[in-house]
Image (cartoon, helix red, strand yellow):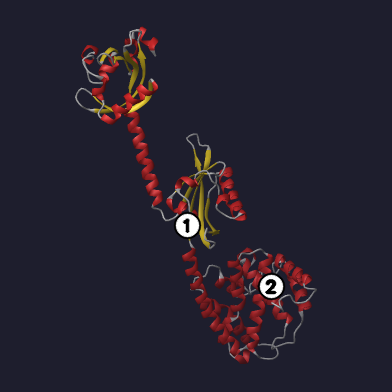
Amino acid sequence: MKDAFYLNISTTDSLGIGLFKYALLPSERFIITNSALAQMLGYESKRELKKEKLSSFFIHDEARFTFFKILRRDGKVKFFETIFRDKKGKPFWVAITASLVVSADKKEHLEGIIENISSHKEIAERLSLEGGFLQGLLDNIPDAVYFKDCNNRIMKVNKFYAEGVGLSLEEVIGKTDFDFFPQEQAQKMFQDDNYVFGTGRPIVGKIERTLLPDGSWNQVITTKIPMYDKAGKIIGTMGITRDMTAYAQLEKERLTMLINALKILSKALEMRDPYTFSHTRHVAHIAEAIGKRLNWDQNRLLGIRLAGELHDLGKISIPLDILNKPGKLSNLEYTFIQEHVEKCYGLIKDIEFPFPLAETIYQHHERLDGSGYPRKLHGDKIILEARVLAVSDVLEAMTYHRPYREALGSQKALEELKRGSSSAYDSQIVNIVFDLFGANNGKPFWVNS
């Protein structure tokens, strides 16, 4: 720095940086300055600036005291940020870098530069304000919000997330899901993050169960999206997780009430026609066993089990002398029997369920080749649940006694299913039935359910 003052310092004016050489002892005064410093401080010339003292430009006494204290202690000050006032008293931010120099005759002076950093401070304050606004916004969202880098390390979270894991905002940074959740659960989260990061595709509305620090479980719904830099490169992920436990519990209670109400009707059918009730209970067990082989979740298994229990509920309106008539039914009587499907559908079609209960029951007498009833549906127009229920219904009905015939037995039922496989019945479901029989030594697998 000292050598710089042997040059013509006016060559630095175009840089907008103020250079100075300032005497401390025996009296404070500017020895050398450049025009840039004079203009920065609001003076028309360097000559006019030389009449002022450096200490007079500090707005805050504490800042002036600290500056000279560091200078005396260290012999230099590097990028000391403070607020100056110009000639008219207008404040602005500066950064001072200076060195304390002692001449041969023991006189002290400063050599250094002063930069106007007001524009940088304004940008920093604006960014800080925007960052504070963003954090404030995030902290008022009643969901867990989190940002992760490409290594799935947490970069930023909101207050809700931090409180959920029992740590401060600062303590969460740099950690991963493995620090907060069980191994198996964290691994699934890790895989989801990597999927979003690797493909650029979001995961929207995924329902999960998470273990809380107090040992309880809750149900959440999570959305994760990729984050990009200015070049369009994925640099991490952002996630939002909402606690749905209370809502899920409310829905569970509502569903339980609906199921119980329908089961009351099912009990009424049992009192009226014990055979039909026994049949529907067996069909429910068969359908549920098939659903498990199809790897259905608990919600879907509940739906197919309930469809099995209620699929003949419409028979409550059919006269008993037709239901229990021995021997062959007339065409008119058979038409009455067929109407039970539409009557049951009409009974439950306006009730909301988290599974296609009404449509499953409505379609369970349809066949893939279009030979079923009541709408002659065929192929893919028949939902998978209805295909499961159709096979379950035929298997049970042929195995056991019917009012109009003796029991044919499970072997006859299997022959019928094999004969109609791919034409009337779904071949995948028929194959599952054969596997279930094989696993139970050829005996009905639902008997002990």
Crowdedness near tag 1: few (<14), some (14–19) or many (≥20) residues, C-alpha within 10 Å: some
Q: Residue furthest front?
A: 106
- Indicate whether 340 appears above or below 370: below
| Amino acid type shown at disc 1 | Arg
Where in the figure is residue 142, as x and y percent of width and height?
A: 42, 56
- Which image quarter is the C terminus in? bottom right
Mark 2 and mark 1 in contact (Cβ < 8 Å)? Answer: no
Q: Residue furthest left?
A: 88
State the SS at label 2: helix
Q: Which mark is residue 242?
A: 1
| Viewer-proximal residue among 151 and 180 | 180
- Indicate whether 13 appears above or below 291: above
Where in the figure is residue 305, as x and y percent of width and height?
A: 61, 73
Which residue is pictured at 48% across the width and 62% down the height?
Answer: 244
**Residue 392 visible to an observer of this rendering:** yes
Q: In 3D space, how far apart are the residues under numbered discs 1 and 2 (Cα atoms)?
A: 40 Å
Crowdedness near tag 2: few (<14), some (14–19) or many (≥20) residues, C-alpha within 10 Å: many
Q: Is residue 377 left or right of residue 34?
A: right
Where in the figure is residue 310, as x and y percent of width and height?
A: 59, 78
Q: Nearer the viewer, mark 1 or mark 2?
A: 1
State the SS at label 1: strand
**Residue 371 visible to an observer of this rendering:** no
Where in the figure is residue 20, as x and y percent of width and height?
A: 31, 15
| Amino acid type shown at disc 2 | Val
Hey, which quadrant is residue 10 in on the image? top left
Q: Which mark is residue 126?
A: none
What residue is shown with label 2?
Answer: 391
Mark earlier in primary sequence (1, 2): 1
